[in-house]
Amino acid sequence: MTLNILFFTVTIQKHKKTAQQCIQADQSMKIRKEHIDRALMHRRM
C-alpha cells in the first residue's frame, strides 16, 4: 500500500504600498463606514 502525500508551499510576499495607495485605502474605508452608518440610521427609522 502506497500513501502519497503532497506538500504545498505557499509563499507570501509583502506588498509595499505607496503613499497614494495608503491615502486611497483610507478614503475608501471612510466612505464605506459612512455608507454603513447611513444604512443603519435608515433602518432604525
Image (cartoon, rainbow, N blue to C red):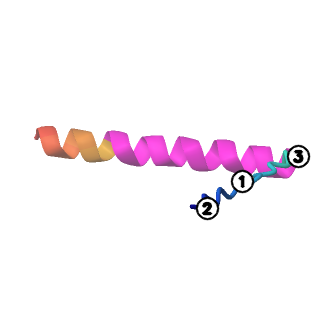
Question: Was residue 45 drawn as part of the magenta stretch in this picture?
Answer: no
Q: Distance between the residues labelled 3 and 1?
A: 29 Å
Q: Is label 2 in a helix, a strand or a loop?
A: loop
Q: How far apart are marks 1 and 2 (CA)?
A: 16 Å
Q: What's the residue type where badge 1 is placed?
A: Phe
Indicate which label's residue lies in the foreground, 1 or 2. 2
Q: In this view, does 24 lie to the left or right of 2?
A: right
Percent of width and height locating residue 1: 56, 61
Quarter assignment of residue 2: bottom right
Marking on residue 7: 1
Upstream in the sequence, badge 3 or badge 1?
A: 1
Residue at image location 48% in from the left, 48% down from the top: 32
Percent of width and height locating residue 41: 23, 39
Pick the front one: 41 or 13: 13
Q: How far apart are marks 2 and 3 (CA)?
A: 44 Å
Upstream in the sequence, badge 2 or badge 3?
A: 2
Dominant SS of magenta comes to helix
Q: What's the residue type where badge 3 is placed?
A: Lys
Which residue is tagged 3? 16
Q: Is label 3 in a helix, a strand or a loop?
A: loop
Q: Is residue 3 left or right of residue 8?
A: left
Pick the front one: 26 or 3: 3
Over which residues does the magenta segment extend?
A: 16-37
Task: Answer whether labels 2 and 3 touch (C-beta < 8 Å).
Answer: no
Which residue is tagged 2? 2
